[in-house]
Image (cartoon, helix red, strand yellow):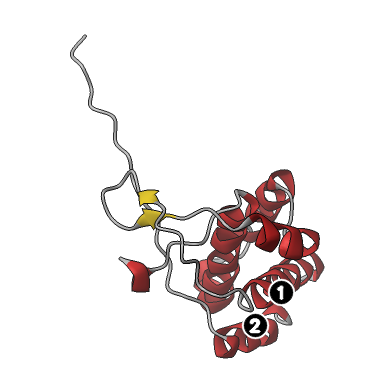
Amino acid sequence: MPDVPAWVGGSFAPPLTETELKAAEKLAERGDGPVRDGVLTLVKMARTFLKTPKSKAAGSPHPSGQGRVVRLDPAEVDRIESVVPWRHELDSLAGVFEGIDPARDKPLRDAAFHLLWYGYKLTADREPATTDTL
């Protein structure tokens, strides 16, 4: 069997702003209970994280070859810990968000997955590598 090279990809979302978080809150109201609650939970998480100053740590090269992996300062991890969902909670939300029909409500689905991506980075104690940092 021939060697198959490993593919290492990167996922870089646009940075979130307070304006986008307010829009996500409005979009959440269009979702059913689990979607609405999940989006609002992630908005609270993101809003708390946005109070974090940009890290001064150099980080390490991202495996994709673009961007850097920057660990959150331990004090920052402690500060946001109560609003960052556990990995298994994020996995559950991913399943909930998969149920959002993109043909019916693409803006809600996009907002939900954008917030979810931030959650996965923060639960790994990493600063989200956004498109403005490439």
The answer to whether mark 1 and mark 2 are in CB contact below 8 A is yes
Judging by the rendered image, the residue that carries numbered circle 1 is 31
- The amino acid type found where label 2 is placed reads Leu
Relative placement, left or right, of 47 versus 113 is right
In the picture, residue 122 is in which quadrant?
A: bottom right
- Helix, strand or loop at mark 1: loop
- The amino acid type found where label 1 is placed reads Gly
Relative placement, left or right, of 11 versus 4 is right
> Can you tell which of label 1 and label 2 is closer to the viewer?
2
Whether 111 is drawn above or below 8: the answer is: below
Closer-to-camera residue (21/134): 134
Q: Which residue is drawn at 52% across and 78% down?
A: 16
Whether 46 is drawn above or below 24: the answer is: above
Residue that protrudes farthest toward the left in the picture? 2
Judging by the rendered image, the residue that carries numbered circle 2 is 27
The x and y percentages for residue 99 are 64, 58
Q: Which residue is drawn at 62% across and 83% down?
A: 21
The x and y percentages for residue 134 are 30, 65
Rounded to the nearest angstrom, the CA distance separating label 1 from label 2 is 7 Å
Question: Dot 2: few (<14), some (14–19), or many (≥20) neighbours within 10 Å?
Answer: some
The x and y percentages for residue 33 are 81, 69
Question: Dot 1: few (<14), some (14–19), or many (≥20) neighbours within 10 Å?
Answer: some
Q: Residue at x 35, y 74 (%)?
A: 132
Q: Quadrant of the N terminus?
A: top left
Relative placement, left or right, of 68 versus 114 is left
Closer-to-camera residue (128/23): 128
Q: Which residue is drawn at 23% across and 22% down?
A: 4
The x and y percentages for residue 56 are 46, 66
